[in-house]
């Protein structure tokens, strides 16, 4: 492997990691509360509010139904407003974050539903407020599952970031298209695939380890 290819791989890998890390952090900060809200406002839940729940569910389903590459193009004006540009790694973070938020919301909701409702009823019987139940019961009990679900989202974002690179988002996807496919250099394509596989394997391993440590059962 030539020195110039190694330099390109390191640069592109750094861009991909930065895109995924920043997007995941922003999406998690918004997605977890969204998932909690989806659960607790549902039927026969601690903060039941059917109209709000239906609106949230409809918006989430709508965003999740849009393919990522179409979403990137559709929100270009919003991306320019937030990032000041529609190309590059910084711009790619905007659609990556927007795509991840509803995904995380649904995943968190699924994990919270696995908490036995008997525990919630016991907390209510002891006079706990809805906020206390969310903070001290729902989230701690569901945290191993939430971490496992977030690991899946991170891996999905790695794939989406590679797709973003195909239309000017930078990172490993951009490297594979511009320096591999367009210049007929199969070694660049192969090296990019290897790096992506290693990155995904590491993310999955780290997520599994963290989930096991949080699981007190």
Image (cartoon, rainbow, N blue to C red):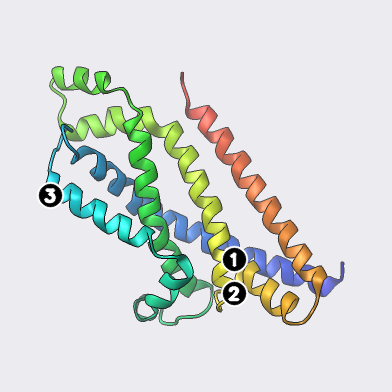
Are the two marked residues, 2 and 1, in contact with CB atoms closer than 8 angstroms?
yes
Front of the two marks 1 and 3: 3
Residue pictured at 15% horizontal, 50% vertical: 52
Name the residue at 67% across, 57% down. 196
Judging depth in this view, the residue of 174 and 123 nearest the camera is 174
Distance from Cα at disc 1 to Cα at disc 3: 38 Å
Residue found at x 36% / y 41%: 108
> Dividing the picture into quarters, in which one does residue 212 lie?
top right
Q: Which residue is mark 2?
A: 166
Name which residue lies at 78% across and 70% down.
188
Instruction: Count all numbered tags in the image, as a single digit.
Output: 3
Residue at the spot of label 1: 162
Vertical order, 141 against 12 (above or below): above
CA–CA distance between discs 3 and 2?
A: 40 Å
**Residue 87 point in image, percent of width and height:** 50, 80
Spatial separation of the CA atoms under disc 2 and disc 1: 7 Å
The spot of residue 39 in percent (x, y) is 25, 39
Q: Relative to 107, is 135 on the left or the right?
A: left
Which of the numbered marks, if any, corresponds to residue 51?
3
What is the crowding at mark 3: few (fewer than 14 residues within 10 Å), some, or many (at least 20)?
Answer: few
N-terminal of the pair, mark 1 or mark 3, is 3
Most distant residue in the front direction: 65
Instruction: State which quarter of the image contains the N terminus.
Output: bottom right
Q: Is residue 61 left or right of residue 152?
A: left
The tag on residue 201 is: none
Element at label 1: helix
- Identify the element where label 3 is drawn: helix
CB under 8 Å between callouts 1 and 3?
no
Question: For the residue labelled by badge 2, is the local secondary structure a helix, a strand or a loop?
Answer: loop
């Amino acid at each position: 492997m030539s020195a110039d290819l190694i330099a390109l791989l390191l640069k592109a890998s750094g861009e991909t990691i930065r895109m995924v890390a920043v997007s995941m952090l922003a999406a998690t900060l918004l997605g977890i509360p969204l998932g909690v809200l989806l659960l607790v406002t549902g039927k026969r839940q601690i903060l039941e509010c059917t109209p709000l729940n239906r609106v949230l569910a409809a918006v989430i389903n709508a965003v999740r139904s849009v393919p990522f590459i179409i979403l990137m193009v559709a929100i270009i004006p919003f991306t320019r407003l937030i990032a000041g540009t529609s190309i590059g790694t910084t711009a790619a973070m905007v659609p990556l974050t927007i795509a991840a938020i509803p995904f995380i919301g649904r995943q968190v909701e699924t994990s919270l539903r696995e908490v036995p409702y008997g525990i919630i009823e016991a907390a209510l019987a002891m006079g706990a407020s809805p906020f206390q139940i969310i903070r001290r019961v729902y989230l701690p009990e569901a945290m191993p599952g939430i971490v496992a679900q977030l690991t899946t989202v991170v891996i999905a974002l790695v794939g989406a970031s590679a797709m973003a690179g195909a239309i000017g988002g930078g990172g490993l996807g951009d490297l594979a298209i511009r320096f591999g496919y367009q210049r007929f250099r199969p070694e660049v394509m192969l090296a990019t695939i290897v790096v992506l596989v290693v990155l995904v394997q590491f993310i999955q391993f780290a997520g599994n380890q963290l989930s096991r440590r949080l699981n007190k059962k």
